[in-house]
Amino acid sequence: MRIERHRLLSSSLGTARELVSLHYGTPGQGEKVYLQASLHADELPGMLVLHHLRRLVAAAEARGEVRGEIVMVPVANPVGLAQNLMQAQMGRFEFSSAENFNRHYPDFLALIGADIENRLGVDEAANKRAIRGAIGAALAAMRPATELASLRHTLVSLSFDADVLLDLHCDYEAVMHVYTETPYLAQAEPLYRHLGAQTVLLAKGSGGASFDEAQSAVWWQLQEKFGGRYPIPLACFSATVELRGQSDVDHEHAAGDAARLYAYLQHRGVIAGTPPALPAALCEPTPLAGSETLHAPHAGVIAFLKRVGERVEAGEVVAEIVDPLEDRVTAVRATVAGLLYARENRRYAVAGMDLCKVAGAVAFRSGYLLSA
Ligand SMILES: [Zn+2]
């Protein structure tokens, strides 16, 4: 294992932050898998999972069983991790820009430029190398101007040439669920089955320029751009893995998840050995555009009537918003049927606040599909 330390652009005199990456195996030999945790810095389950996984992978490396390259970034957001305001950790948005740490990643298709066509031919593997080369050159030429931009740039520079990219997040309270892009569904299936995901949400371009999508989308975008004139693989399978809720941070969950990710690494062939039999899927994937977010119609105390992991029917009451001043109780009903896969962990709602999410099977939304 090799440790690399990447100095981020300092935002202020006398301060310096670094991003630390752990490297196992041999670059260029076999597949490359990239895993990072806690890009939203107040989402900690992944950090503990990578603590367990690095021990498993180090033992495999000592046995000579790492067949590809594995890169781990257990602390993907040292900027957000240090953001505390009056005893509350605030790791989703950067204080100085108010930007979400998991948005505004580069548009790789635009970065590569139109002249990529001159380097494409009939050999799919050669095309993959040419496209990765163009992305790498474009990233190397970028000069980030802020600490946040340098964090994003460092993360994509470590991961853009990965065959598999897993971004470990969590929701407020949630069951295990996975977001990925529709064209990569076949590659996603062994991952979500090994993980025991209870919801799998599919979108093709959700509009947020998130870390994972920015890197997987360019491949299907190039396929569409050239309309089959050149063979182009779906070369970067990426997924956002939501490791349940913010408080689900304990050794039992983390060691189990690390073992499940290790089995997936074996399934991909990056680590030698036969993985456990692929478990049956716990759900059918559903469109992200079919996921309904329920909102508080007015301010009040939230009393949930449904837990995460429960199925709800269309029209069923999921929560009540209680206003004790007006003696008012308002039922909040799902309009779609599906699994209640995530809900808020605060219990006071301001008007309009997101309360919970139901994975419906039928797409009904369009445009920008992610939360803030
Ligand atoms: Zn997150």
Image (cartoon, grey):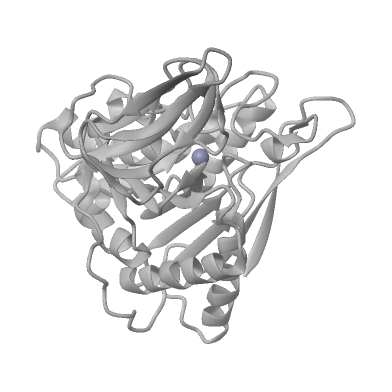
Is 70 positioned to the left or the right of 357 in the image? right
| Labels in figure, total | 0
Q: Nearer the viewer, residue 162 or 194?
A: 194
Percent across and percent down for residue 245 are 51, 48
Q: Which of 343 and 61 is in front in this view?
A: 343
Q: Is residue 227 above or below residue 269?
A: above
Percent across and percent down for residue 329 are 44, 22
Percent across and percent down for residue 82 are 75, 38
Percent across and percent down for residue 14 are 90, 31
Q: Which of 334 and 42 is in front in this view?
A: 334
Q: Which residue lies furthest to the right in this view?
A: 14
Residue lying at 36% horizontally and 30% vertically, measured from the top left: 112
Q: Quarter-wise, where is residue 152 in the image?
A: top right
In which quadrant is the N terminus drawn? bottom right
Residue lying at 60% horizontally and 58% vertically, measured from the top left: 249
Q: Which residue lies furthest to the left in this view?
A: 228
Q: For residue 35, say whether it is visible.
A: yes
Q: For residue 73, say whether it is visible.
A: no
Q: Which of 207 and 226 is in front in this view?
A: 207
Residue lying at 63% horizontally and 41% vertically, measured from the top left: 41
